[in-house]
C-alpha cells in the first residue's frame, strides 16, 4: 500500500502540457463506450470543449433557498441559456418542461440536511429512474476528509458501476470536510480520488494554484459557483477557472440571485464558450440590463 510519508515535496503537474485528446475531444474519456461519450457530448460543447451548467439542486439539503422559493417561476426562463441542468428528480418532474431538450445532471444522493451531518448520505435515486428521466449524468456528493467519507465514496463507486451498465456518466461533486481548507492540496486530493475511482467528470471549487488541481485530475473539471458574490466577481471566477484548466462552470446562486438572471447567464456563456474577459462579459451584462 502507498505510504503518505516519503513523497516528494515538489510535484511537477506539467501545467503547460495539454492532455492527449485523440479519439475524443474531452480529456481522459477516449476509453469509454458510445453511450458515455454520447452523453458527455450533449453536455460539453464540441467547439469550446466547455459547459455552462445551471445548478438548482440546493433545496435537497437547504429547503427553500433565496431565489428558488418558486422554481417553476425562477428556473424556466433560464433553461434556454444553460447547457446542462443540475437538479433533483423531484424538481425535474415538477418544474422542468419535458420538451426542454436539455441534458440533465441528476442529483442522486440524499440522506442529510443542514440540520445534520451533511456527509452522512446514501444513494437516493435508482439507476432505472435515472434511465427513465433520460439523465445525461448522475451527480454524487463526495466528502473528502469528513466524518462519513467512506459512505460517500461507497455511493460514488456504486453509482459509477451502475452507470457504466447503461452508459450514464457519473459526476463526482467534491465537498471538503469542515476542518479542511479549500486549497489546492485538499481539492487536488478530492478531485483525483473521484477520477481514480472512475468518475467521468468532477465538480469542485476554484482555489489558488487551481491549475495544479486541474492538471492533476485526468478527467474534466467543472467549478462550482459557490455563494452569491457581485456579478463582476462571479465573472472573474469563471474566467480564472477556465484560464487555469477548468472545462466549465456550474453556477446557481450567482445566476438566479443576480439582478438580471438571464443577462448574467448570457455573460457567463461569453466567458466560458467565447473567451471573453470578465470585464468584457460584465459590460455585456450591463448593456443587456440597460436594453430591458
Image (cartoon, rainbow, N blue to C red):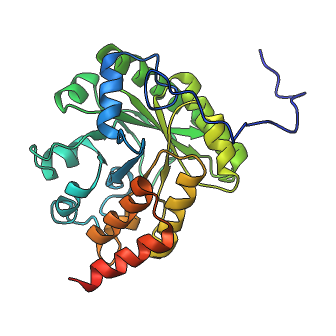
Q: Residue at x 39, y 40 (%)?
A: 111
Q: Residue at x 44, y 21 (%)?
A: 23
Q: Nearer the viewer, residue 16 or 267?
A: 16
Q: Nearer the viewer, residue 43 or 254?
A: 43
Q: Residue at x 29, y 36 (%)?
A: 42
Residue 219 visible? The answer is yes
The C terminus lies in which quarter of the figure? bottom left
Q: Nearer the viewer, residue 40 or 72?
A: 40
Q: Left of 64 or right of it: where is 31?
A: right
Residue 150 visible? The answer is no
Rendered image quadrant of residue 270? bottom left
Q: Residue at x 62, y 32 (%)?
A: 192
Question: Where is residue 1 drawn, in percent x and y?
Answer: 77, 14
The residue positioned farthest toward the right in the image shown:
6
Q: Is residue 38 above or below residue 185?
A: above
Q: Is residue 8 above or below residue 60?
A: above
Q: Left of 149 or right of it: where is 106?
A: left
Question: Where is residue 107 drawn, in percent x and y?
Answer: 34, 40
Q: Left of 98 or right of it: where is 237?
A: right
Question: Where is residue 33 drawn, in percent x and y?
Answer: 37, 15
Amino acid at each position: 500500500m502507498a505510504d503518505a510519508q516519503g513523497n516528494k515535496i515538489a510535484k511537477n503537474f506539467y501545467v503547460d502540457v495539454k492532455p492527449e485528446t485523440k479519439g475524443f475531444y474531452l480529456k481522459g474519456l477516449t476509453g469509454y463506450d458510445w453511450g458515455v461519450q454520447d452523453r458527455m457530448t450533449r453536455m460539453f460543447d464540441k467547439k469550446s470543449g466547455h459547459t455552462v451548467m445551471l445548478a438548482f439542486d440546493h433545496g435537497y439539503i437547504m429547503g427553500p433557498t433565496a431565489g428558488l422559493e418558486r422554481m417553476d417561476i425562477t428556473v424556466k426562463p433560464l433553461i434556454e441559456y444553460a447547457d446542462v441542468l443540475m437538479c433533483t428528480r423531484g424538481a425535474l418532474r415538477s418544474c422542468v418542461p419535458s420538451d426542454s431538450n436539455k441534458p440533465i445532471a441528476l442529483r442522486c444522493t440524499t440522506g442529510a440536511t443542514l440540520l445534520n451531518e451533511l456527509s452522512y448520505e446514501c444513494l437516493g435515486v435508482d439507476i432505472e429512474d435515472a434511465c427513465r428521466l433520460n439523465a445525461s449524468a448522475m451527480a454524487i456528493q463526495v466528502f473528502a476528509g469528513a466524518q462519513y467519507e467512506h459512505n460517500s465514496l461507497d455511493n460514488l463507486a456504486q453509482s459509477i458501476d451502475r452507470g457504466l451498465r447503461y452508459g450514464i456518466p457519473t459526476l463526482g461533486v467534491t465537498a471538503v470536510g469542515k476542518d479542511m481548507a479549500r486549497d489546492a492540496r485538499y481539492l487536488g486530493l478530492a478531485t483525483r480520488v473521484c477520477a481514480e475511482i472512475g468518475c467521468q467528470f468532477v465538480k469542485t471549487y476554484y482555489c489558488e494554484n487551481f491549475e495544479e488541481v486541474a492538471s492533476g485530475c485526468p478527467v474534466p473539471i467543472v467549478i462550482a459557483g459557490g455563494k452569491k458574490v457581485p456579478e463582476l466577481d462571479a465573472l472573474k471566477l469563471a474566467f480564472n477557472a477556465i484560464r487555469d484548466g477548468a472545462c466549465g462552470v456550474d453556477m446557481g446562486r450567482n445566476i438566479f440571485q443576480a439582478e438580471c438572471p438571464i443577462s448574467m447567464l448570457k455573460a457567463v456563456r461569453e466567458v466560458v464558450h467565447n473567451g471573453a474577459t470578465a470585464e468584457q462579459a460584465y459590460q455585456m451584462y450591463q448593456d443587456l440590463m440597460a436594453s430591458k
